Amino acid sequence: MREVSRRNALRRATWTAALLSVLVCLATGRVQSKPDNPLHYFVALLGPSLALAQGGQASPQEQPQADAAKPEVGSKPADASKQDQTTGPAPAGTPVDGRAQQAATGAAPGKADPPAGAKVDPLNGEKKGAEITVTRHPIHTTPIQVDVNLVVVNVTVTDPYDRIVTGLDQENFEVYDEKVGQQIVAFSTEDAPISVGMIFDSSGSMSDKIEKSKEAALQFFKTSNPQDEFMLINFNERPNLISAFTSKFENLEDRLITVRAGGKTALLDAIYLGLNEMKKGTTNRKALLVISDGGDNHSRYTERDVKKAVKEADVEIYAVGIFEPLSSRGRTPEEAGGPGLLSELAEVSGGRMFSVEDPNELPDIMEKISIELRNQYVIGYKPSNLVRDGRWRRIKVKLSPPKGLPPLQVYARTGYYAPTQ
């Protein structure tokens, strides 16, 4: 009986002490923040005392939880401040870590929604501010999808000194399809990734020029956009695919170094193979770069075959001809016809042809081509003639340049085959 009386007295004393402790905390302001649930707070605070009042001790799991519920003396609501720092809006232009963004919003990292009223770039389908804006795409992104009814024309503009002209607007261009004016629905000046195929002449006549040609080719690869991809074909008596498309120019360098000059010139076969390989490129923009010193003398394909293939392929051809002077007695009839052939192929495709007599000029020419490919205007229009007859339709791009500019030269492909389905 005495033991029971002693325990009851201990319980009453413990309850009294606990309640006094709570009153002291409230009176002295030790409780700085109002708990979400007062009942939970008092249970946590009185937990140890209640356990003692029952004649036991607080369990190891209960004790830390009770301690954690107690706010520190003079502390600020730290949780709220931390939340503001991690999930609040970041300053404009500040990169946001994807994991932090996911934790704060509950959504996977991705592009933020564009502002209302933004225009859409028809080439990439992205809304960027209040006007069309172009961006650099990551290396391994999905290629831009273009409407099958959209005719895309890459345009290069130069001044009378053959310098690249940039900064023109959509309003400065006019497009005609079979002499009928068309409405431009897509316009861009982006440095978009490009698939470049190189056709490298290693025939016997290149013996004294091949090392300088290799140097120029490698320089072109090294100064390219990291997102570009390259394919390499060398040829003499027959074309040889040295490397399929790759973004690692080191692979091309290792293989190009081993190329030796010798044999005849199957130029047309090499271009035909190159056009077929260009179909495997993963970007929407494609260009074929031909480095050769003369005309064809050993191909199975004819000029007619190759010209038709060029018209069917949406590939710009840039040709660099290393030709002997016109007065040279060592120039063969095939070599004499080389400039005309390459120039015609380049013109139809919207590319250009450069002729050099000194191989030392090659690095400058290759740099010029690299600059041109990265400073083109990309124009898209939907033909007003929707008949799917598979016929060749001529394109003409005209300029209405701003006042004060001299006459400008436009390079663009001359036509396309209408779809059949």
Image (cartoon, grey):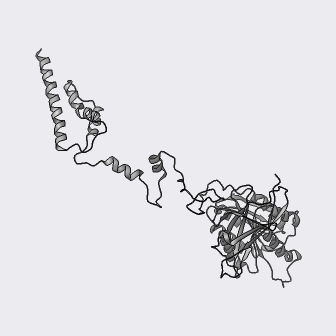
Identify which residue is drawn at 82% across, 56% down.
387
Q: Nearer the viewer, residue 126 or 10?
A: 126
Does residue 238 appear in this view?
Answer: no
Residue 374, quarter of the rendered image? bottom right
Q: Nearer the viewer, residue 210 or 89?
A: 89
Most distant residue in the top direction: 1
Identify which residue is drawn at 72% across, 64% down.
183
Residue 48, percent from left and from top: 23, 31
Most distant residue in the left direction: 2
Residue 373, percent from left and from top: 68, 69
Identify which residue is drawn at 25% across, 30% down.
58
Residue 332, above or below 93: below
Q: Quadrant of the N terminus?
A: top left
Left or right of residue 167, residue 323 in this image: right
Residue 331, percent from left and from top: 85, 79
Does residue 233 appear in this view?
Answer: yes
Residue 32, quarter of the rendered image? top left
Q: Nearer the viewer, residue 412 or 289?
A: 412
Residue 257, above or below 96: below
Residue 364, percent from left and from top: 67, 77
Residue 223, quarter of the rendered image? bottom right
